[in-house]
Amino acid sequence: MEPATRLDHNHELTLKELPYLVRWRDDRCKRCGRCTAVCPVFAIVPTVVVHRVVESSGAFPQPKTGRRVVTAIKQSTNISNYCIGCATCSLVCPNEAIEPEYNPQNKFLIHKNRGGTPYTRGGRRNDPLVSTLDRLKFTRISMLTDPALDAGRHEFRLRSYLGRILPADELPVKIIDGKAEVDHLAEKFIPPVREIYPVMIGSMSVGALSPNMWEGLAMGITYLNEVDGMPVVMASGEGGMPLRLLKSRFVKYFIPQIASGYFGWDEMIRAIPHMVEDPCAIEIKYGQGAKPGDGGLLMAHKVLKLISEIRGVPLGVDLPSPPTHQTKYSIEEAVAKMIQSMYMAWGFRVPVYPKISGTKTAKAVLNNLVRNPFAAALSIDGEDGGTGAAYNVSMDKMGHPIASNLRECYLDLVKQGKQNELPLIAAGGVGKKGNLAANVAALIMLGASCVSIGKYIMQAAAGCLGDEFNRCNVCNLGKCPRGITTQDPKLYRRLDPDKVAERVVEVFKALDVELRKVFAPMGRSTELPIGMSDGLSADDPAISERLHISYAC
Amino acid sequence: MCRLSAITSSEYFSPVENILSLETMKEGHDGSGMGLVLKDLGGEFEGLKEYPVLSGICSKGGMQVLDDYMDQKGFKLKHIWTPKVKPVKGIQPRDYYFARAYEYPPGFREKPFADKEELLLATRLKLRKMGEQDESIIVFSFYPDVITLKEVGDPMELGEFFGLGTDNLRARIILAQGRQNTNYAINLYACHPFFIQGFGSMTNGENTAFVPIREYLMSRNFPGYTGYNSDSEVFTHILHYSCHTLGYPLNYYKDVITPLKASEIEGRQDGEAVALMKMALRPLCIDGPNCVIGFTPDGYTFMVQDAKKLRPGIVGGVSGKIGFMSEECGLDSTIPKRDRSLDVTPMKYDMVIVSPGAKEVKVWNQLQGWTTIMN
Ligand code: SF4
Ligand code: SF4
């Protein structure tokens, strides 16, 4: 005879397979139901369970067994509703009765491919190991041979250039009566160059981020520029920018991005005649650290009214961008056509540069750009980079770490004597372990002119919950519990744009102090120590050899 | 810190004057070397101004190799000066110190000076390379009307060692440095002053931006930008690059090594050009703290320092004799009778430039322009 219920439970997962186990404490729970209401993925549900109870009442022990029906919180073992470890439930629990716990034994990746669909997610690379950047230290300290600088009192100029810089021997400068003058008759194209803060906020699109998040970042950036005199800029990501911002004078603090889907560029082109200021620069995305070689995708549930307006597309449709720019068949063509036509759109007043994902072939791209007098920079997004939605395999396994990729490119430029002409922007895992200033300084000393950050600012400014143990990372699903990467007003109203802006300002001001604390003892204050590799050491001989820096132990 | 003493004068004078001022400025151990560069030569070289002078040190074997090479290249020896070396305790004498004037090879005599300069540089670099391994040939300069002398030891003792007190070695511009042993092993090529194609300079302080500057210079495709046994050699090469290669007037050297902020550049008449120069030459910003003293081929002498130079050098003197010293006491020892109110301590934005023959002292201020101190 068949039993009433199956005893084997085959084809069901045990909790032990899941990445996070929900620790719920019956004794503390007051059954308010807030946790189950807030859980973004329905990983916990209210349920009833039957408890066997042994009770005794009266003057003498007279134990009696009985059954009691109680409400309880149950964790789902359904892989579609796995607990993402976000701890939003703990956040709302009045009695500290519930919290997720990481399960190092999990077999999540083995099971998360139901329906033949591989695991996709947002977030980060999920590599909790110490990155190369965190293995570098600053070992050249000025002491008796020259006075160290006082980081608090000395004047520091932490500025960098974004734009193609003409070499000195090609400058249209002539000397007349002992004075240098620009020779305007020489008809030499002088590329536009911006002086910016050496750390920028990297491309996160208006569609990927919630309106409150994007607005918060934008306000923070504007405040830094207008009030604190720190020329921090921010890249828009693919998909255009709000029209109101495009037509405002603040657009000069932003770098609109054009990517393979060209989303938002109809609106952008139409806005050009109404712009009162030029944007800081234009970024052409050929690749990104999150999913090297893969295109973008904004899921239909994120394409709400605002996004459909900005991008010029219908509501509620998936918006895939192809992996490559479909109209370009060679790098030469891509460089020549895209860069030049973007220059043309703004009358050659705005620097245009490409962004690629970290790759062994970065040097080939670089050399192509070196030969194009319009290329304004090269942005390289290392494998640890990326806030985008991607296949897990792309996120975890594709791409090149930024440190050696950047260093190779820089040394290649040095070999050609072009190290000052084409600025390198480095990104990918900067501040991964919280050491933002140290990582930035190390990248600059390896040869970066500028460093771009994404995840760091999401965590610092908006409390993004993600971490390298795959905590949360549902940025692609529109379910962001912090309201950072969602277009759902119920979720993003949790995020106060003013608070985000405030945090952006705080983060950059703290970063500025810390950068001085790194550069001052190394005796650098007037110019950014780009390529000052003698100041760096690695704690691993193989790293030092690869990066051409010293080894210190 | 290294002691610097430069004198420019309308009369020929002996390097002993510089050495005495170095001695006055001495503070603690100063024994890792002295370098002298003499320009606008007097004494036995006065009649040889057209002829390139090769300065250096050779072992016996090295001398033979050098002679063979110079012969083979067609350089004809015209005049030899060697110091009358006296043994001094603590100074390890080398075989052969020399300054030799040559005649250009026949094919070069009528060539433009630029071609000659190129030949002299290539020859010096070749000789340096030939003797680098075993230190059998060390050459410091090969240029008309310039002599360089360097050795490890205390400046006063070296003066005695070379017999400079009785020698008739004279010049109108002399740069002298007493080098303190700091981070680097004692190597004569690391000893200031440095010289390249008519430009000479010496520096004290630490050059924290050395590596990016070196990388930039070495990637200019100019064979002379090499060596860099000392982080201060780059200052001479930046000077050469700005004034010789790029053709900027001398005062722009200041804008190259210590560029202004963007907001400060806006106020300059030549701001548009200076802004471009600043960007283009960003890797040459020195970031100090350094005091640089040098001269140009046409005989101008200068002092410049960056904002971090908390113990600045000083320039002062009388018409016809001006001293550039790292310490005031050095100036007092060399030119005690002078109007001290005319002494200049070039600050953050300043560069002091003295005309040939020490006639005119001018200060170039990056924000205010020129001021004449002495005329
Ligand atoms: S940690 Fe997040 S996903 Fe897990 S149960 Fe709590 S709210 Fe749900
Ligand atoms: S909090 Fe939002 S942005 Fe951060 S990992 Fe979760 S879903 Fe992504």
Image (cartoon, grey):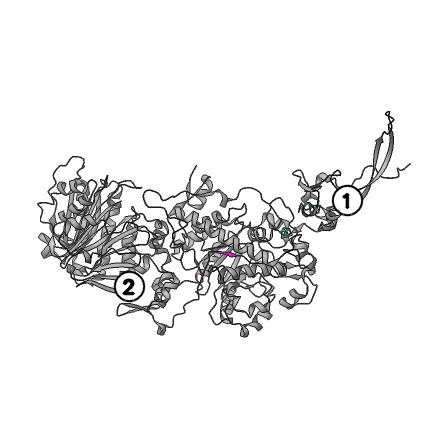
Mark 1 secondary-structure assignment: loop
Q: Amino acid at mark 1?
A: Arg
* Residue A369 colored in magenta in the image: no
Residue at image point 71% right, 46% down:
A82
In-front residue for pair B293/A147? A147
Q: Is residue A425 left or right of residue B43?
A: right
Which disc, if any, is residue B20?
none
Percent of width and height locating residue A347: 48, 72
Please name the amino acid that badge 2 sits on: Tyr
Q: Which mark is residue B248?
A: 2
Alpha-carbon neighbours of circle 1 within 10 Å: few (<14), some, or many (≥20)? some
**Which element type, helix, strand or loop, lies under badge 2?**
loop
Query: Pointer 1: what residue?
Result: A31
Magenta span:
A191-206
Disc 1 and disc 2 in contact, CB within 8 angstroms = no
Which chain's residue wears label 1? A
Query: Label 2 neighbourhood size at 10 Å, few (<14), some (14-19), many (20+)?
Result: many
Task: Work out whether residue A530 or residue A28 is closer to the camera in this orientation and state it.
Answer: A28
Residue A153 located left or right of residue A180:
right
Marks 1 and 2, how far apart in space? 80 Å
